[in-house]
Amino acid sequence: MVSDFSSSEYWSTRFEKERSFEWLASSKALGPVVLDLVKELVRSRSSVPAAAVSAAPKRPIGPNEEDPPINILHFGCGTSTLGPYLARLLQTEHINAQVVDADYVAESIVAAGPALPRSAAWQSARASGSEGSEVEVPLISLDVLDLGQLKDTAPAGGWDLLVDKSTADAISCGPSLPRQRGQGGEEEEDLVEPIHILCDNLASVTRTGGRWLCISYSSSRFDHLGPITHGPGAESASDSSSAWRLVSKIPVDGAYTGEPSTLSDGNGGKRVVYAPETNVWAYVLERK
């Protein structure tokens, strides 16, 4: 039976048994990419004003309201260690940032913890600021196809950076949806591909000039946005009405795809192998 990667039931069942898994690329491989984006966002704060999003007013997440952090949402985190890894990396670079992990089956991930202990870094990052914890990375329950949930959890001014590793891929496996799903109003009769819903929803909670780093196995994941464009005022040819601009698309070094397999090494031992390396793409999108 083919797995339904868009199904919450699939992921709940999987996370009950899975200790940790990294989709498409390791945290170490993505660290420099995220760091460069965050530094760019820090530099841009003096020239690009944060746009208010249509969400309830909230206090910025962070220790100093006068110096708000770069707010980073890692959605569809699953059992990945990317969130804690990025939080430690940014702390080492003395960058004021708050990383939030989110998944629509977060309860299943947390519930499986005692039976399937996560790494020490993963556990420490979710210790709610307890003594000895290096960083705090909250894990929240969030369905990114539900606009109401997105607005309820967004910081004031919107997210600065969104990160996903194949979450957009999984969502793209699902059925077409009404464009206004989750907005609380009448849904349009015409159905659209779920990737369009995802783009619309995320744009609603991302500040102007914010970035979305999407790691995908697909070389055509954002073809609906048109060709890569640069600079203010540049429009994507295919969908000029989109709130996103495709800035770059590059192959990811050290990427891997497929489920790990355990094989006998011929000497009575076993080893874990991954599928051969394939093209994995890092898309960077900018909120117009």
Image: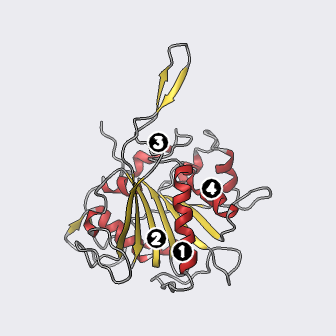
Secondary element at image label 1? helix
What residue is shown with label 1? 41
Query: What amino acid is at disc 4?
Result: Pro
Residue 14 shows which numbered tag? 3
Disc 2 element: strand
Decide if residue 224 is on the left or right side of residue 258: left
> What separation in Å lies between label 3 and label 4 (alpha carbons)?
21 Å
Q: Earlier in the sequence, mark 2 or mark 3?
A: 3
Neighbor class of circle 1 (other Cα within 10 Å; few <14, some 14-19, many 20+) is some
Residue that label 4 marks: 84
| Crowding near the residue tagged with mark 4, few <14, some 14–19, many ≥20 C-alpha atoms within 10 Å | many
- Taking the spot 38% from the left edge, 65% from the top edge, the residue there is 248
Q: In this orientation, does residue 141 appear?
A: no
* Chain-order first, disc 3 or disc 4: 3
Label 4 near label 1: C-beta < 8 Å? no
Depth-wise, is mark 2 or mark 3 nearer the camera? 2
Look at 53% across and 22% down and name the residue there.
270
The disc placed on residue 211 is 2
Task: Please give the label number shown on residue 86.
Answer: none
Mark 2–mark 3 distance (CA, rounded to whole Å): 30 Å
Q: Nearer the viewer, mark 4 or mark 2?
A: 2
The residue located at (80%, 58%) in the rendering is 131
